[in-house]
Image (cartoon, helix red, strand yellow):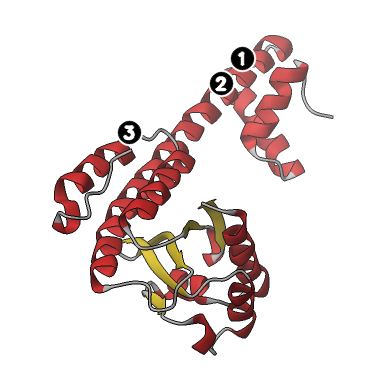
Amino acid sequence: MAEFDPDEPFAAHTFAELAVELHDAPTVEETVEAVLQFALQAVNCGYAGVALAARGGRAEIGAVTDPVIEAVYQLQIDTGEGPLLTALTEQIIIGVRDINEETRWPQWSAKLATIGIGSVLHMPLAIGEQTVGVMSLYSSEPNAFSDDDLAIAHILARHASIAVAAARHEETMAKAVDARKLVGQAMGILMVKFDVDGDRAFAILKRYSQDTNTKLRDVAQRVIDTRNLPT
């Protein structure tokens, strides 16, 4: 893990090391974990979390440094309101200097007050107009985030946006390759079992997928597992 030097403004070399570390992270989960660990070192926060953008504009929990932040995230997801969702949908920075003076999201504010959170910073993660997620930083003290903290969070958010987007793309591509392999194996089984050509075997898989509203790769997996068509 790259270590932050508080005596060096913005620690340019440290961010360069972080960029390499994030690039080398093999999964989205490991990427966001690296982001959070660096945030705890570089910014004046006691807790941190990353929520990822899911289909339909929804938020899903990517990683958190403490279970209490998972509960805070889940509250906003369940109620459909809170600064996390605002930062995610509007791609704007949401800073709450003092939880006790926040009135926009009463349920959220009350929840944070019970666990001793004083101030919060939500940084949207985005590539152009594509929303990737939100990085959240929490401190037990009100007015905890300085201008330097905000500048560092900005830079970290940029690195995190690129890294998470790249990791998601790699996972999507890997799943696509895996799906093609499964379909190819299933087609081979059907070609031998029913003496059909490749086009016919694929048509059979596709028909079963459509008729049962099942993903093509799942139909293929069942054929591989049972050596026969699903019932």
Q: Position of residue 220 (x, y in %)?
A: 66, 27
Counting from the top left corner in percent of width and height, residue 135 is at: 42, 61
In the displayed structure, would residue 110 be above or below residue 115?
below
| 169 lies left or right of 224 | left
Marker disc for residue 188: 1
Figure quadrant of residue 58:
bottom right
Q: Amino acid at mark 3?
A: Asp
Nearest the viewer among 156 and 109 is 109
Q: Which residue is mark 3?
A: 24
Q: Position of residue 33 (x, y in %)?
A: 45, 45
Q: Nearer the viewer, mark 3 or mark 1?
A: 3
Mark 3 surroundings within 10 Å by alpha-carbon count, few (fewer than 14), some (14 through 19), many (20 or more): few
- On screen, residue 27 versus residue 93, left or right, reads right
| Position of the N terminus by quadrant | top left
At label 2, the amino acid type is: Gly
Instruction: Estimate the spatial distance between the alpha carbons at disc 1 and disc 2, rounded to whole Å.
Output: 6 Å
Q: Is residue 102 visible?
A: no
Quadrant of the image containing the C terminus: top right
Towards the viewer: 153 or 229 = 153
The numbered dot on residue 184 is: 2
Q: Image height check: is 186 above or below 31?
A: above
Mark 3 → mark 2, Cα distance in angstroms: 30 Å
